[in-house]
Amino acid sequence: MTAPPDSSHGRPAASVPLVPRPRFAAILPGSARLAAGTAVVAPDVPGVAPVVRRLADRLGAALGGAVAVHHPRHDRRWAARRPGRPVDVQLVLDSGRRAAEPPDDPSTPVDESFSITVDDHGVVLSAATPAGLRHASTTLLTLVERPESRGRPRPVDLPAMRVEDGPVFAWRGLMLDVARHFLDVPTVLAVLEVMADLKLNRLHLHLSDDQGWRVQLASRPRLTEASGSTAVNGDPGGFYTAADLRRIVHAAADLGIVVVPEIDTPGHVNAATHAYGELVPGGVPTDAYTGIDVGFSRLHADLPGTAPFVGDVLGEVAGLVDGPWVHVGGDEALTLEREEYVRLVRLALDAVADAGRAAVAWQEVARADPPPGTVLQLWDEREGAEEVVEAARRGARVLLSPASRTYLDLKYDADFPLGLEWAGHLPLRQAYEWNPLDALDLPDGSLLGVEACLWTETVRSRDDLAALLLPRLAAVAEVAWSPASSRDWAGFRTRLAAFAPRWTAAGLAWTRTPDVAW
Ligand code: TNX
């Protein structure tokens, strides 16, 4: 970031709290005042409407007073604005930069790049797509909001500046394990807001596991009747109704986040085998399981109930989300022979294809020779990476969640009260200082992105969740957005310290790690 000291703003520009780090930002001579009377001027097109709503709401809260929205075709205010008044914020869908046609394949990445110009005349946010305008708005909000003085709105004199930005990776995700412990809708909505501010764009929900089943399905009602209320340690469970999941999907979409639902098969299925004896040889349902071992449960390829179960469940779940992906799990089926594992995984992959969606799966699914376009999620650095690389050579895409960098359920250090240790500890700096492009020797273009994972064996409350998630999610977000060549730990610490008060203002019990001067 080109960032000379900024006298007009009263603070060095290096402390402008942008996380993730923009590709280019320069403070220029001049300034623009945003205050009550500032309006948002934007094109009246469907994808931009939620962006404008969020921008106007939050600008209004920061500046004091409602921020009006004008659509230029119906309103000449922008052109007629007189000097001396608060400036407006104009959103421009720049057709010159726009990809000619929306892609046929909805899983094709969209152009998320944007620019911001602040000068004496106003603020202009420009991008080729609504996604780009959303990130531009988020950047502007980060510059305008002072979360530490919440409740005291005031005018903001922004230094004149130019920002040009866009992500390295198309998939910047977070996985929440809502199976080991359930996370209710308000908690998920709060996490979505945090994600949007970090420009993350995929929420992967791990909806089923041995300890609980978290989505109510009309085709198999006993899943939640028998396994909705259980959780690790005998703690309270819970589940989403279809309407709950739709609420999450819609809220995410408004924030530019695609929900990727996961039904884990053919292992991690005790919640299912506890609900339906037809999935178990002999027909007797398994006992409920509330421990934290992995790898013991399984489906059976030769039982007549298995294929209809996999088909119905994945088909119904696919119908509850709007995005192009469904995650089929596939990890740690330790009691299955390879041949039966492959048969069972193929059932799941076929069910997702039949539903018109692309499959995402944990890395082990590389063994089942998945169809081109399948997204394989790498997590285990101990073994199996070569299989993923080979599958990528045959057309699979790769998502990186190496445990030692992205497993936000690992303890920060030995003394941290929450979290697991199987892959070591994960201090903030370790989550930050790595380059996804160096992780595997992948064919060009096959690396889709990076996803943080938050398994919830030890997470019993929203506070526990926030303590593990933040600040490390910010590190993963910057790794996924900003080129490795432009990142540096010292700069990240400074920017993060200025960014974090918004988490406090949102009531999140994040962790003040010892490596940052918070
Ligand atoms: C491994 S990662 C698992 C999960 C655990 C996690 C705990 C993966 C695909 N499987 O079942 O919750 O470790 O860190």
Image (cartoon, rainbow, N blue to C red):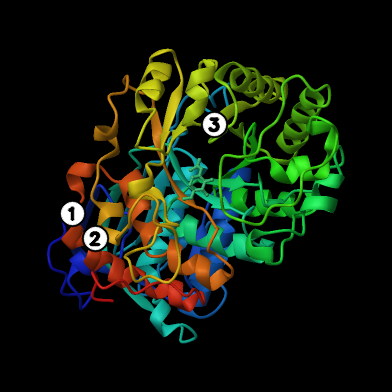
Tell me which residue sits at (56%, 68%) in the image.
Answer: 57
Tell me which residue sits at (25%, 58%) in the image.
Answer: 429
In the drawing, what numbered circle is on residue 361?
A: 3
Looking at the image, residue 189 lies above or below residue 374? below
| Residue at the limit of the structure toward the bottom, as seen here | 152
Mark 3 belongs to which amino acid?
Answer: Ala
Residue 344 place in picture, x, y as percent: 66, 22
CB under 8 Å between discs 1 and 3: no
Is 382 left or right of 325, judged from the image as shown? Answer: left
At label 1, counting other C-alpha atoms closer than 10 Å, the crowd grade (few under 14, some 14-19, many 20 or more) is few
Residue annotated with mark 2:
492
First reached walking from the N terminus: tag 1 or tag 3: 3
Q: Which of the two residues, 94 or 349, is positioned nearer the viewer here?
A: 349
Tell me which residue sits at (56%, 48%) in the image.
Answer: 48
Judged from the image, the secondary structure of the residue bearing numbered disc 2 is: helix
Quadrant (top left, top right, bottom left, bottom right) of the C terminus: bottom left
In the drawing, what numbered circle is on residue 488?
A: 1
Q: CA distance from mark 1 to mark 3?
A: 32 Å
